Image (tube, helix red, strand yellow):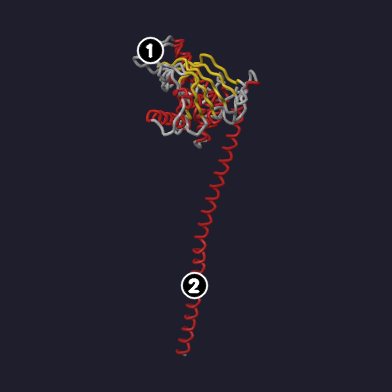
Amino acid sequence: MDAEKSSNSSFEDLSNLNEADMKAAAEAFIDNEKQDAEGGEKETTGQEEDICDVLGNGQLIKRVLKKSTSNKRPQRGDKCTLSFTGKLENGKIVEKQENFEIHVGDFEVIQGLDMTIPLMDIGEVAEVQVDARFAYGSLGLKNDTDPELSIPPESKLTYEVHLKDAIYEDFSALKSYEVRKTYGTRKKERANFWYNRNEYNTAIQLYRRALDYLDDRDGDPEAEFEKEDLELSNNELQSLLNDRLIVYNNLAMAQIKISALDAALQSVENVLRCQPNNSKALYRKGRILEGKGDTKGAITLLQKAATLEPESRTIQQDLAKLIIKARREEHNEKKMYQKMLGQANKLEQKNKQPQKQQTVESSKLKLLGYLMGSILIGVAGVAMYRYKY
């Protein structure tokens, strides 16, 4: 079993490129609307008015194919129903969805479509030309079911999108267990999709959105629901709890990938509070402690995880690496202490040497003094003898 992700799966970074791009799209659209309202210097045909360069750089172009009379557009977070087909530049259809449900702004479709849908009226049909940067980028999209439908890297795509409906969901629309379970699972699976593409910031956003639907108790089964919260059976509570813990585990792994260690630690603690022997949470916490420099603490957690999941090669390999690292750190620590002790001994010897030399010189002076005294006494005795006799 792969310890990197939860078994049933396919920030704190606040500066998200996707958010910036969506803001730029909205500002560009507002500018276009103002120009239309004020009247520009350049005369345009009706066909040109139906074309919108969303970002102003030619990388995201929207063209109205069929206008709507609703004059109503979806807002961020609204549930939208749409049908679309996506084509490569050679005209080959590589994506097709009918009555597909998404929440605007949740990256449940490619970024280019997610930015364009809020610019469509309900009922409108539009053609959207999307540069690879806002589609599937340098990775493309592999289709395991039908390899012929795989999207090559750096592919520009053209979509025909029909926005069929858009509704705002208040709390009453989200009270049922089935809705919470469905939305939470959908967000989790889409987050896994972005995680597998190394889009960790986007994955983190969607894991958090999944938690919004799997209730807001932060993994604590003992916490009480708010007054307006759901009334669920024990089986339904347990089901949502299990899903929630899987999401927290995956969220922690994505946070580790962007080195948001404090946030990742909080995520795994939410799991361990409910399941102290959750091997994946123990493994992730070990990784977090290693990142924080606590090698011994990390070894303890990985040893426990290895006991709970002995078949995991990933845990075994990481544990072996940590043990080698700990021994190396211990060896380096001993060498440092020995070096410090050696320097201290040398300093002590250096301080003792002048004292020893001083003692020898003092002894020599004393001996010389004794000799000189003896000689003087002898000379004085001879002089007195001669004087007397």
Q: Which mark is residue 135?
A: none
The image shows residue 278 at horizontal and vertical percentages of 52, 22
Q: Secondary structure at mark 1?
A: helix
Q: Position of residue 39 (x, y in %)?
A: 39, 30
Q: Amino acid at mark 1?
A: Ser
Secondary structure at badge 2 equals helix
Q: Quadrant of residue 328?
A: top right
Determine the residue located farthest toward the right in the rendered image. 148
Q: Kindly identify which residue carries mark 1.
A: 172
Q: Can residue 262 be seen here?
A: no
Say whether disc 1 or disc 2 marks the residue closer to the N-terminus. 1
The reply to whether callout 1 and callout 2 are in contact (CB within 8 Å) is: no
For the image, the number of numbered tags is: 2
Residue 2 visible in image: yes
Q: Residues within 10 Å of mark 2 (few under 14, many from 20)?
A: few
At x 48%, y 18%, the residue is 66
Give the vertical position of 149 relative to 53 (above or below). above
Give left or right: position of 72 versus 193. left
Task: Look at label 2 and name its amino acid.
Answer: Leu
**Residue for point 42% across, 23% down:** 76
Q: How far across and down, in percent of the image, does residue 177 sit?
A: 44, 11
- Residue 218 position, x and y percent, is 42, 22
Compare residues 144 and 310 and report the one nearer the observer: 144
Relative depth, front residue between 258 and 90: 90
Q: Nearer the viewer, mark 1 or mark 2?
A: 1
Q: CA distance from mark 1 to mark 2?
A: 106 Å
Q: What's the residue at 52%, 58% (across, down)?
A: 349
Choose between 98 and 335: the one closer to the eye. Answer: 98
Dot 2 corresponds to which residue? 365
Give above or below for 76 relative to 258: above
